[in-house]
Image (tube, rainbow, N blue to C red):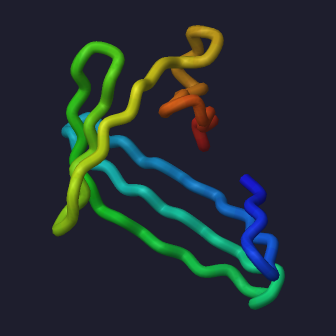
Amino acid sequence: MVVEVPGDIQTWTTVWRFDADGICLQTVETESLAEGFPRVTERACEYRVAGDAVTIAYVGAGSVTFDFSFAGFSPDRLVLDGFEYARLS
């Protein structure tokens, strides 16, 4: 995702890892044109699925609930609140 902020343009790349045991990890790499180097943030979490919603509880922080689906009914294309994520090998 490309984001414009005052005086800068940033790219944000988010990678989710969901394990079968309910453990997850969110990795966000942000690269600022102004800074010229990437910053990586990892957030450990747990998840729970209920119907078409998934609740992510971040370790030591709050939680968030996303609507989710699979684009084109493919298990390799996860959609969280309208943002599509492709499965990595």
Query: Residue 26 location in percent, x, y?
Result: 42, 57
Residue 81: give x, y in percent of width and height.
50, 32
Q: Quadrant of residue 10?
A: bottom right
Q: Position of residue 27 (x, y in %)?
A: 48, 62
Q: In the rendered view, would you say 16 is above or below 44?
A: above
**Which residue does the image show at 21% across and 64% down from the upper left?**
61
Residue most extreme to the bottom:
35
Q: Residue furthest top?
A: 73
The image quadrant of residue 31 is bottom right
Q: Is residue 18 left or right of residue 22?
A: right
Can you say which quadrant of the picture contains the C terminus? Answer: top right
Classify residue 39 as left or right of residue 58: right
Question: Along the line of sight, which residue is nearer the eye, 14 or 33?
Answer: 33
Name which residue lies at 53% across and 18% down. 70
Q: Residue at x 27, y 14 (%)?
A: 51
Asked whether, in this view, residue 11 is left or right of residue 83, the answer is right
Q: Total marks drawn?
A: 0
Residue 2, placed above or below residue 79: below
The residue shown at (54%, 28%) is 79
Q: Position of residue 62 (x, y in %)?
A: 21, 57
Quarter of the image holding residue 2? Answer: bottom right
The answer to whether residue 28 is above or below residue 22 is below
